[in-house]
């Protein structure tokens, strides 16, 4: 089912003209292919936001928390990342819904992208000065709110501007920053003080967001077409009834499970290299694994997206990618050695590259209404953030008392496969 303007997205009040004839560009289904410069600038902006998300999670927060409370570092890191993810669960759909209703002359999305980058950079600078776990948690929550506002607006750019027949390829390119951001972020902060690392990431996120927000068009929403829902209707609108939109519900659940598997598998990766693999240089080892993973992802993501566009099929690619990712988790569970970790990184990157391109395209085809793209994609992005809340609650007791890292990675495999199986329940996307 292609995203379109349904009855609930008619122009409100006294908006002029027939809805199907006089729709403004901001609400029309895109038909003109986007060009390489636009895609390139969108990739750069996404690179900034993913650097801001993952560099703290992978390197800066673990180092900061370990320095503050080394005896309880796993539990404390779980609390910090879990609270940040909980903030993201709320911030992403709220920011998306607000951007749907933004009538700025600069467009609906760009003000949120640039504003999120600027305020988020300030939050990172404040986070860098935190010396207690509660202060770290507060700083990370603030950063998550800002960067999720940025992510919500960037996510909506694809269905706003990219036609369905091009979304697999574009989603493939946009998916690369999710892992390239980790690589560049880790390279940027490795061997540097935590304070310096946070400040460098803060500068990077602003610099990378500026070209897209100042150099591309963002169609403004005329005031007459802004939704005028009351607060109660606005709040209840965040619930997308899976009975009315079953494909959206199954797509959401699929993403939630696959991302939960990803969160379970990566949350304690630095500690896994230290305590299970006993790698002599865990930070250096983590960087090597990220590089291998990224190279494999870059090989598969755009190719898979284009192949999916040509065939018009999405679901089979998601199923295959989930199985590949599960193989990587089983390898880590059964053979916790450095060579196996390198192989698993390559397998996981290849599988996730297929998944990230095709699933993103699939999601845009099950959105209920064009007028609510930002809000609905924000609801979808809960499936990215909520696993970060749930993963620490599941992973910490497993690692501490219920079998350690082997059981954790077997759980990762099982959850990921289940997500791949459930995507077959989607009916209106092949």
Image: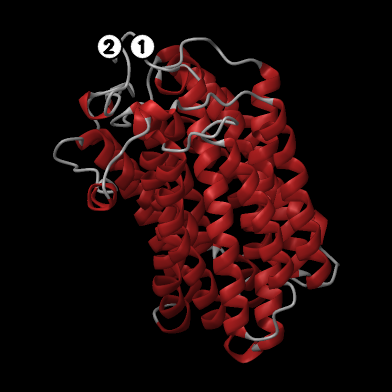
Local crowd size for mark 1, using a 10 Å CA cut-off: few (<14), some (14–19), many (≥20)? few
CA distance separating discs 2 and 1: 6 Å
The quadrant in which residue 24 appears is top left
Query: In front here: 11 or 146?
Result: 11
Percent x, y for residue 413? Answer: 41, 55
Position of 311 compared to 60: left or right?
Answer: left
| Picture residue at 74% right of the left edge, 41% below the top | 208
How many marks the image carries: the answer is 2
The answer to whether one can see residue 316 in this image is no
Residue that protrudes farthest toward the left in the picture: 243
Residue at mark 2: 18
The quadrant in which residue 207 appears is top right
Percent x, y for residue 27? Answer: 40, 22
The answer to whether one can see residue 400 in this image is yes
- Marks 2 & 1, CB-CB < 8 Å contact: yes
> Relative to 70, does residue 291 appear above or below in the rendering?
above
Position of 347 compared to 415: left or right?
Answer: right
Percent x, y for residue 231? Answer: 28, 52
Position of 123 compared to 86: left or right?
Answer: right
Residue that protrudes farthest toward the front in the picture: 14
Query: In front here: 205 or 360?
Result: 205
> Relative to 339, does residue 177 appear above or below in the rendering?
above
| Picture residue at 62% right of the left edge, 23% below the top | 217
| Picture residue at 43% right of the left edge, 65% below the top | 86
Query: In front here: 23 or 400?
Result: 23
In the rendered image, the quadrant that contains the C terminus is: top left
The quadrant in which residue 336 appears is bottom right
Query: Residue 305: which numbered mark, if any?
Result: none
Q: State the SS at label 1.
A: loop
Residue at mark 1: 22
Q: State the SS at label 2.
A: loop
């Amino acid at each position: 089912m292609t995203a379109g303007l349904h009855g609930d997205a008619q122009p409100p009040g006294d908006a002029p003209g027939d809805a199907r004839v006089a729709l403004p560009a901001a609400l029309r289904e895109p038909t003109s292919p986007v060009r390489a410069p636009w895609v390139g600038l969108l990739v750069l902006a996404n690179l900034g936001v993913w650097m801001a998300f993952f560099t703290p999670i992978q390197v800066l927060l673990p180092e900061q928390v370990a320095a503050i409370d080394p005896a309880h570092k796993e539990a404390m890191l779980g609390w910090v990342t879990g609270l940040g993810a909980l903030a993201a669960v709320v911030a992403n759909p709220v920011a998306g819904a607000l951007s749907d209703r933004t009538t700025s002359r600069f467009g609906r999305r760009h003000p949120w992208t640039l504003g999120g980058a600027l305020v988020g950079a300030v939050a990172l600078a404040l986070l860098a000065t935190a010396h207690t776990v509660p202060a770290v948690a507060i700083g990370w929550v603030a950063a998550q709110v800002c960067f999720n506002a940025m992510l919500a607006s960037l996510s909506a750019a694809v269905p706003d501007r990219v036609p369905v027949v091009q979304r697999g390829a574009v989603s493939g390119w946009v998916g690369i920053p999710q892992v390239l951001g980790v690589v560049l972020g880790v390279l940027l902060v490795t061997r540097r003080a935590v304070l310096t690392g946070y400040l460098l990431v803060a500068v990077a996120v602003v610099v990378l967001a500026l070209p897209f927000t100042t150099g591309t068009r963002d169609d403004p929403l005329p005031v007459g077409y802004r939704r005028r829902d009351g607060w109660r209707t606005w709040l209840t609108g965040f619930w997308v009834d899976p009975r009315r939109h079953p494909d959206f519900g199954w797509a959401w659940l699929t993403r939630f499970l696959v991302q939960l598997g990803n969160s379970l598998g990566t949350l304690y990766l630095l500690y896994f290299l230290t305590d299970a693999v006993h790698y002599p240089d865990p930070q250096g080892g983590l960087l090597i694994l990220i590089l291998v993973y990224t190279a494999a992802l870059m090989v598969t993501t755009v190719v898979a997206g284009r192949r999916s566009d040509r065939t018009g099929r999405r679901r089979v690619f998601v199923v295959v990618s989930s199985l590949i990712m599960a193989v990587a988790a089983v390898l880590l569970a059964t053979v916790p050695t450095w060579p196996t970790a390198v192989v698993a990184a390559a397998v996981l990157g290849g599988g996730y590259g297929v998944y990230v391109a095709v699933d993103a395209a699939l999601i845009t085809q099950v959105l209920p209404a064009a007028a609510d793209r930002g809000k609905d994609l924000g609801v979808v992005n809960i499936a990215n953030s909520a696993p970060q809340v749930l993963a620490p609650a599941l992973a910490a007791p497993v690692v501490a008392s219920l079998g350690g890292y082997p059981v954790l990675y077997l759980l990762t495999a099982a959850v990921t496969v289940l997500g791949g199986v459930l995507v077959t329940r989607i009916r209106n996307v092949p």
